Amino acid sequence: MKMSVYVDIDDTIFDHGTNNWKPEAEEIMQKMHSQGVFIVLTTARGDKYPYPHVYSKRATLEALANKHIKYDEIIFNSPSPRVMFNDRMVLSVQVDPKVGLTNAVLDEVTGYLLDDAED
């Protein structure tokens, strides 16, 4: 499936304020990568936090590398809310911060995109 997916880090793949993975996030990130999805991670983490603070660029990159997570780009210092202007359909899914990225969320998005492609 060829598409770009923008994934926030805190409360989506990591528990907020930590570098601990949400339960299904690692599997989903690997699944999306294996399907050829172009993955862009976004986060407000970055320059204002010195290492070893959990929000520092270095600590974040180390946590991603420790799990061998593959992604194509990462955007640091990106505050929320985030808005995208695009000439094609944009799908936005708000993730429950208590649960994070789950297979159910990914299945819902995939199903929506496939249904839209059939119309």
Image: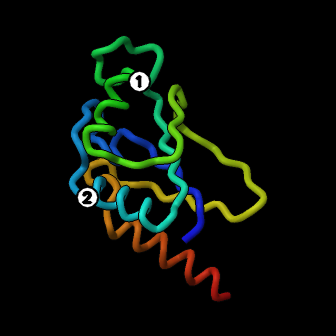
Q: How many marks?
A: 2
Pick the residue in front: 107 or 72.
72
Above or below, 64 against 77 in this view is below
Question: Residue at point 25% right, 58% down?
Answer: 24
Residue highlighted by disc 1: 57
Position of the N terminus, as image quadrant, is bottom right
- Coordinates of residue 111 in the picture (x, y in percent): 48, 79
Say whether residue 24 is left or right of residue 40: left
Pick the residue in front: 65 or 52.
65
Question: Residue at point 26% right, 44% down?
Answer: 67
Question: Residue at point 26% right, 54% down?
Answer: 99
Which numbered disc, 2 or 1, marks the residue closer to the eye? 1
- Coordinates of residue 32 in the picture (x, y in percent): 43, 62
Q: Amino acid under label 2? A: Glu
Residue 115 in which image quadrant: bottom right
Indicate the secondary structure of the residue bearing disc 2. Answer: loop
- Coordinates of residue 66 in the picture (x, y in percent): 25, 38
Q: Amino acid under label 1? A: Lys
Above or below, 86 against 77 in this view is below
Say whether residue 32 is left or right of residue 26: right
- Distance of label 2 from label 1 (alpha carbons): 23 Å
The crowding category of the residue bearing disc 2, from other C-alpha atoms within 10 Å (few below 14, some 14 to 19, many at least 20), is some
Indicate the secondary structure of the residue bearing disc 1. Answer: helix
Residue highlighted by disc 2: 24
- Coordinates of residue 16 in the picture (x, y in percent): 29, 36
